[in-house]
Image: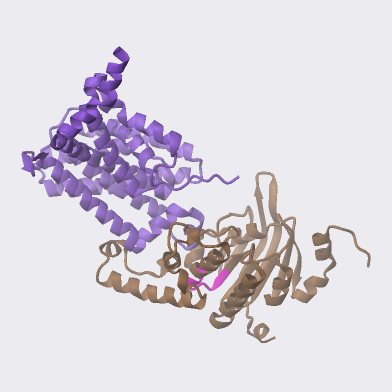
Chain colours: A brown, B purple
Amino acid sequence: MAAAKRIGEPVLEVRDITLSFGGVRALLDVSLEIRAREILAIIGPNGAGKTSMLNVINGFYHPQEGTIAYKGRVRQRMRPHEAAEQGIARTFQNVALFRGMTTLDNIMTGRLLKMRRNFLWQTIHWGPALAEELEHRVFAERIIDFLEIESIRRTPVGQLPYGLQKRVELGRALAMEPELLLLDEPMAGMNVEEKEDMSRFILDVNDEFGTTIALIEHDMGVVMDISDRVVVLDYGRKIADGSPDQVRRDTAVIDAYLGVAHEA
Amino acid sequence: MEIVAFLHALLVEPFVAMWQNPEFLLEVAIGGLLTGVMYSLVALGFVLIYKASGVFNFAQGTMVLFAALTFVGLLERGFPVWASFLLTALAMIAMAFVIERLVLRPLVNQDPIILFMATIGLTYFLEGFGQIVWGGDVHPLDIGIPKSPLIIGGVLINEFDLVAAAVCGVLVTVLAVFFQRTAIGRALRAVADDHQAALSVGIPLKNIWVIVWAVAGIVGLVAGILWGSNLGVQFSISLVALKALPVLILGGFTSVPGAIVGGLIIGVGEKVAEVFWTPATGGAIEDWFAYALALVFLLIRPQGLFGERIIERV
């Protein structure tokens, strides 16, 4: 596969992460790496700790134990703001858009960190600040083109159907020009056609911009089709890590999903 | 018979009086409109903070008082108006920093009720602190806003009210442009919509909170100057905040236009009710009109005129 050749060194490594909430352990001693320019799928039954892992990576959750190495720095914990500044963007399982704002404004929020003028200038909204705004607007339009959402540019996203909201959310993440893109169930609740569109966008992003992508997905057909590597979590532990083919045949994985003892 | 006479006085005579003297009705309404402008300004401060941080800031009224006290204190020490305004604005910005650092940051992710109680504490602190620094006397405030009555088209209007309306109009326009057109305004709206998503695109919540508290402080300063020019700067100004509560219920806690329209409706409503229904009820309607109206709204439209629909997800 052509994509496999481009895959490079790990860009992000989590080591021995343990995360618990009170007495509930969400993650136990999980280590995994995300390699440059790969599409990594994190799968597992409900409650396996997949979303918790994304939250640890972008700093929403702070693990009790373990480290996160990213861009040559080893940390105990990430902070959301720092993660965003360092090129980590994400989407959410239940679509976390700014519902009262238009598609364009939502995507423009993704440009905030790229804006140089300080807020006094922005308040004046004149001269250099206006020029900068226009420059970012052009970028936002490119994303709108890319995701084929021209017609809903001015629509408040709260009024959009779910599938389109997911697309706008991807657009906002892309506006950050991320190096690492975390997608939490990008295709949940979509019909077949929408899933195909979304798969195509994810592959295109990975291909055209070389963006590293880690995604959580339940649709195994999609996972096997688009990912270079699959990590399987179950009850907060990592039970498998490998190519889609390896994982598909892994007995521990089959057990976790079917929940029955099987015979060799 | 007595009941009929009472109902007649309550339901017929006021409207007859309005019909017979429409200029007078207009004057009363305009007078109310301008009280309403000031309610709006106080309510605006609440909305700004509530939108961006989900905190119901009980201290908003005290912030108005504190700003007015600081402003008048500086004036009395010989600073010119513009310098007093600037220095007080800076003081409000500094206060926003301190509040974020000492009150909001340690309580981040706590329940709204906890933050609400913290702002009650803040109220008492600011009242005491204001008195320590500036004393507890009533300060007259005159920054040269003309107060002479004008006759426009046969209707008597106080010049001061016109100035107040103009100031409010400019302030709201500036805020609207700031919120709708600038990147920082976009960030503010983003935070108001979804904290987590805002964090994920790298909006620093802490800075946003400082900005909204500072803006609310400056809006409070403007409100304080206008109220103070009218009534003198005294501790009862902080009670104006109580009138802002029905305004918020009417307009919706999350809506800037709602705060404005709600303030105007209540200002006009209570003045008209006071003037035209006093013969029937014996007066003092002004004191409870706003609350009664708010009660009706709570029953029929709890999200207010412009508020977001309240949808509870389980």
> Does the magenta segment cover residue B193?
no
Q: Position of residue A133 (x, y in %)?
A: 34, 71
Q: Position of residue B142 (x, y in %)?
A: 10, 38
Q: Nearer the viewer, residue B222 or A180?
A: B222
Quarter of the picture holding the N terminus of chain B: top left
Snapshot quadrant of residue A199: bottom right
> Does the magenta segment cover residue A174?
yes
Q: Nearer the viewer, residue A76 or A150?
A: A150
Q: Residue furthest top?
A: B1
Q: Is residue B132 visible?
A: no
Quarter of the picture holding the C terminus of chain B: top right
Identity of the residue drawn at 52% across and 75% down = A147
Snapshot quadrant of residue B17: top left
User: Is B217 displayed left or right of A174 in the figure?
Assistant: left
Identity of the residue drawn at 61% across and 61% down = A54
Q: Nearer the viewer, residue A9 or A102?
A: A102
Q: Residue furthest right?
A: A263
Identity of the residue drawn at 28% across and 42% down = B40
- In the depicted structure, whether residue B276 falls above or below residue A222: above
User: Is B83 displayed left or right of B274 in the figure?
Assistant: left
- In the depicted structure, whether residue B190 falls above or below residue A178: above
- In the depicted structure, whether residue B9 falls above or below residue B69: above
Identity of the residue drawn at 47% across and 58% down = A98
User: Is A121 displayed left or right of A92 in the figure?
Assistant: left
Q: Which residues are magenta?
A: A173-181
